[in-house]
Image: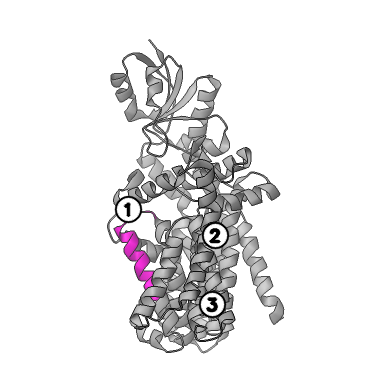
Amino acid sequence: MRNWFLPLIILVYLCLLLFGLGSFSLIDWDENIYGAASKSMLETGEYFRIQVNGQPFSEKPPFFFWFANLFYKIFGLSEFSTRLPSVFSGIFSFLILVQFGTLLHSKKFGYVWAFLYSASLLPLLLSRTAYIDHLFNTFILASVLSLYLYETKEKGDFRSRAIWILSAAFFGGIAVLTKGPLGLAIPLFIFGANRLLDLNFKIRIFDFILFGIVSVAVLSFYYLTNFLLYGNEFIVQFFDFQKKLLTKSLESHTGPWFYHFIVMFIGFFPWTVFLFPGAKNWRMFTDPKISRISRYFLIWLGIVLLIFSIVQTKLPHYSSSIYFPLSFFVSYLILEKPEILKSNNFSFLGIGLVVGLIFLLLPQISEYSSSSMGVGKELLPTFNFWDSSSGLALILGILIGFVGLQQFKNGKEEGKDLFLASTWISMLIFVGILSSTITPKIISFLQDGNLRLYDKAENSGNQIVYYKYLSFYPMFYREKKIHMMGSYKFKDETFLLDSNEKLSIICNRNSVLELVLTHPQRNFQEVAAENGIVLLDSSPK
């Protein structure tokens, strides 16, 4: 049975990740951006030039888009295929944590670590969406752990060291090709900071020459090829975008400096209650058996929170790699000091029931919040019992987990296993049901109006224009190019307003007066409106 346990768990995990995966449209902006970039590669066959809406797209490197195209070739172009790279990442990270945890401590620790990470709220959501971050984080993890294993083998023969230095360079390079420079910067910073704290300044020059050769070779596969084919356009625009992220709050994604600390507590649900005991018992992580890897993860946690507290653009997934360190610390705490489960059982139950109740009442909350914003009830989706079932599944799983904790408190060791297993599987079922029931209705309500306006604009035969407004939704689901005005993401085409072209302009309602006043040489007539977005027909007077 033991030989079948890991394959069985992986099969269950995979099935639950796939449950409801393609049941709702790609979400604006990020999922539709990456979907549109992947779709463009499929249609044009240009795999070394990333394009969205017929224009170069330089905000992200291509690895996720290449991966999505692999699944397009197998399963066809769809939301399901576009999200499969993240599902792969979920499986891959689970296997890494089980294997490394077993090597580091014990098989049980490996499974507990994998369970905690894969069922944490934010990593779980990211493993089911077409956001790049889960895949990016997994490659960083592989690089960091490879550097740790390199250090443990450093005094051995070259062959035993080389496999891990090559692995660190390869996965770090792939991480850079997935999202950007932090893919190598984070592993190297962790390694360097750890050496500094150890006062160990001895470096095997040949080993790191090898590291440099492999990482440069991986990066050159795209960057050098792209440069030879298209010049320095991508590199210049990519680093310009990174500078904007650091210094400006883009698309109004702003927040206080402690934004990512708040996200950390929310995103680590349902294990959040164990973070405080973990901090309180920090001395247990100085045990020589795990002190080095604990320091690796502490540095990782600190540097990511520091970087993204400084970065002006705030989004929850930016700091999502911290759940590897957090789940490591809590997993070790659960195994080595299990009494913390007994003392935090009611906190676990209370927080779990509150979150479950929120999702149980989500249809009513959606109706109330919409009506308070002046949206008529007749415009809202029709909700039913099944739209509350995700909350019910979560509450049931939390209650079973609490029963397990009570059994453990009464001296039954199997109660701890019941707690972990029921919480893990209920989180996966909860998100799967959520994806299959109420989420499609909410996403359709929020986004489909944009497609209806686009379709009316396309049927008019006019050139379609987005004026100081942006949605990537039609770029994945429709074909005709949209002309952009007032967006830093695309080449500006405001000159069309001075031409004799007939235009169908989609914009925010508060932009209509601006258009009328600044372009008196044109007529503007409202054709339709959806949720504060307006479609205008415009022609020269």
Kindly tell me whether residue 206 is visible in this rendering.
Answer: yes
Q: Answer with left or right where residue 519 lies relative to residue 124.
A: left
Q: Nearer the viewer, residue 399 or 302?
A: 302
Q: Which mark is residue 28?
A: none
Magenta part of the chain: 297-315
Cβ atoms under marks 3 and 1 closer than 8 Å? no
Q: Is residue 316 magenta?
A: no
Q: Nearer the viewer, residue 306 or 107?
A: 306
Which callout, 2 or 1, points to the residue nearer the camera? Answer: 2
Compute the Cα span from label 3 to label 1. Answer: 36 Å
**Residue 421 percent coordinates (x, y):** 57, 74
Residue in the picture at 48% in, 58% down: 176
Q: Amino acid at mark 3?
A: Val
Q: For mark 2, what is the residue?
A: 218
Which callout, 3 or 2, points to the residue nearer the camera? Answer: 2
Cβ atoms under marks 2 and 1 closer than 8 Å? no
Q: For mark 3, what is the residue?
A: 112
